[in-house]
Amino acid sequence: MSGSGERPRLLERPKLRRILARIVVAIGIVLAVIGVVSARYGWLFAGIILVGLGAAMGPARIRR
């Protein structure tokens, strides 16, 4: 951010990033559980990937 009066962009807000990361992780967990229970390994792998993406989206990943 260049000026002191500017508002941060939408995805630069830690609270919003935390909420989005939790939603992505929750969807990934649901897909992984469905994949394990129904033996659909594609869903399991998709769930694992979504959990990893959700973890990477967290507010600690903001770089300035």
Image (spheres, rainbow, N blue to C red):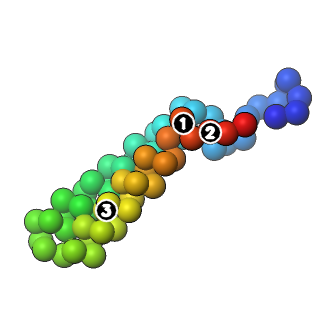
Q: Is residue 22 above or below residue 33?
A: above
Residue in the foreground of this view, choosing between 19 and 58: 58
Is there a contact, CB below 8 Å, between mark 1 and mark 2?
yes
45 displayed left or right of 23: left
Mark 2, Cα crowd under 10 Å, few <14 / some 14-19 / many 20+, is few
Q: Is residue 52 left or right of residue 3?
A: left
Q: Which residue is rendered at x = 27% and y = 76% of the image?
A: 42
Q: Which residue is mark 3?
A: 47
Q: Earlier in the sequence, mark 3 or mark 2?
A: 3
Query: Looking at the picture, how far across and down is residue 64, in whole percent?
Result: 72, 37
In this picture, residue 60 sits left or right of residue 55: right
Q: Which comes before the other along the chain, label 1 or label 3?
A: 3
* Residue 20 visible, this angle: no
The residue lying at 19 percent from left, 75 percent from top is: 40
Q: Position of residue 60 (x, y in %)?
A: 54, 35
User: Which residue in the protein does label 1 denote?
Assistant: 59
Residue type at mark 3 is: Gly
